[in-house]
Image (cartoon, rainbow, N blue to C red):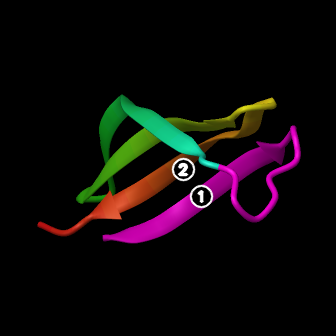
Amino acid sequence: SRVERLSFKLLAPNVPGDVMVMQGRVAKLETNDATNLATVEFAGRNSRGFHVTGTATLALNN
């Protein structure tokens, strides 16, 4: 697999020693010019709130 597109926002700070919990979901599957693509929405949260949110589109190996 390879990253085709990546977009994210950094929000609350994250410092050494913080525990960050990441989660994500496959939001979309599609085929473009014989390439299978998966768009994933993701977020990371620590004790201060959301540290990062974003989307990534991955080209999947066949």
Residue that carries the numbered disc 1 in the rendered image: 5
Left or right relative to 45: residue 29: left
Give the residue drawn at x 19%, y 69%. Answer: 61
Left or right relative to 40: residue 16: right
- Kindly indicate the quadrant of the structure image that contains residue 52: top right
- Kindly indicate the quadrant of the structure image that contains residue 15: bottom right
In this rendering, the answer to whether 58 lies above or below 2 is: above
Residue situated furthest left in the rendering: 62
Q: Are marks 1 and 2 in contact (CB under 8 Å)?
A: yes
Give the residue drawn at x 48%, y 51%. Answer: 57
Span shown in magenta: 1-18
Tell whether position 20 is magenta. no
Viewer-closest of 44 and 54: 44
Residue that carries the numbered disc 2 in the rendered image: 56
Judging from the image, what secondary structure is the residue with disc 1 in?
A: strand
Judging from the image, what secondary structure is the residue with disc 2 in?
A: strand
Figure quadrant of the C terminus: bottom left
- Kindly indicate the quadrant of the structure image that contains residue 45: top right
Badge 1 amino acid: Arg
Badge 2 amino acid: Ala
Give the residue drawn at x 50%, y 42%. Answer: 22
- State how far apart marks 1 and 2 are (Cα): 6 Å
Give the residue drawn at x 44%, y 41%. Answer: 39
Foreground label between 1 and 2: 2
Left or right relative to 52: residue 2: left
Left or right relative to 34: residue 47: right
